[in-house]
Image (tube, rainbow, N blue to C red):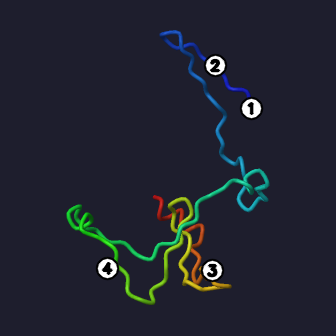
Amino acid sequence: MIPSNEAVAGGTQRVEFDPLNGAVAEGADVNLDMILDVPVTLAMEVGRTRISIRNLLQLNQGSVVELDRSAGEPLDVFVNGTLVAHGEVVVINERFGIRLTDVISPAERVRKLR
């Protein structure tokens, strides 16, 4: 695709590209090989809370902070800050892990972005 250039005032040029409509047909196979090794951040969230800086500074060893979740509720699983699943904590060979109980569909993730 070669863009067409048009001179604009001030010595700059306006560039116009062909539209991308139909660039990837619905249901067409997409080659993901180029991005398979891109690292992402996976984070699990047990819960959240809001506290004042005064209360934050008073925290010390043994302090308890109440979160917005009940015991037994699933954890949220985020990839680069986007909710992708819910799960529960498991212990495997003395290490923590997470068992995914509900994966958010790609369509639902896109809907939440809008």
How busy is the neighbourhood of tag 2: few (under 14 within 10 Å), some, or many (20 plus)?
few
Q: Who's the residue at 46% across and 58% down the image?
A: 114
Which residue is label 4 attached to? 64
- Quadrant containing the N terminus in the rendered view: top right
Looking at numbered disc 2 in the image, what kind of residue is underneath it?
Answer: Asn
How busy is the neighbourhood of tag 4: few (under 14 within 10 Å), some, or many (20 plus)?
few
Q: Quadrant of residue 18?
A: top right
Q: Who's the residue at 55% across and 59% down the image?
A: 80
Q: Who's the residue at 79% across and 59% down the image?
A: 29
- Relative to residue 101, is residue 27 drawn left or right? right
Q: Is residue 91 above or below residue 103?
A: below
Q: Is residue 91 above or below residue 61?
A: below
Nearer-N-terminus badge (1/3): 1
Residues at circles 4 and 3 in contact by the CB criterion of under 8 Å: no
Residue 58 or 24: which is nearer the viewer?
Answer: 58
How busy is the neighbourhood of tag 3: few (under 14 within 10 Å), some, or many (20 plus)?
few
Point out the frontmost of discs 3 and 2: 3
Q: Looking at the picture, how far across and down is residue 32, in whole percent?
A: 76, 56
Q: Looking at the picture, how far across and down is residue 57, in whole percent?
A: 25, 63
Q: CA distance from mark 3 to mark 2?
A: 59 Å
Q: Secondary structure at mark 2?
A: strand
Which residue is label 2 attached to? 5
Q: CA distance from mark 1 to mark 2?
A: 13 Å
Q: Looking at the picture, how far across and down is residue 20, in whole percent?
A: 66, 42
Which residue is label 1 attached to? 1
Looking at numbered disc 3 in the image, what kind of residue is underneath it?
Answer: Arg
Nearer-N-terminus badge (2/4): 2
Q: CA distance from mark 4 to mark 1?
A: 60 Å
Q: Secondary structure at mark 4?
A: loop
Which residue is label 3 attached to? 95
Residues at circles 1 and 2 in contact by the CB criterion of under 8 Å: no
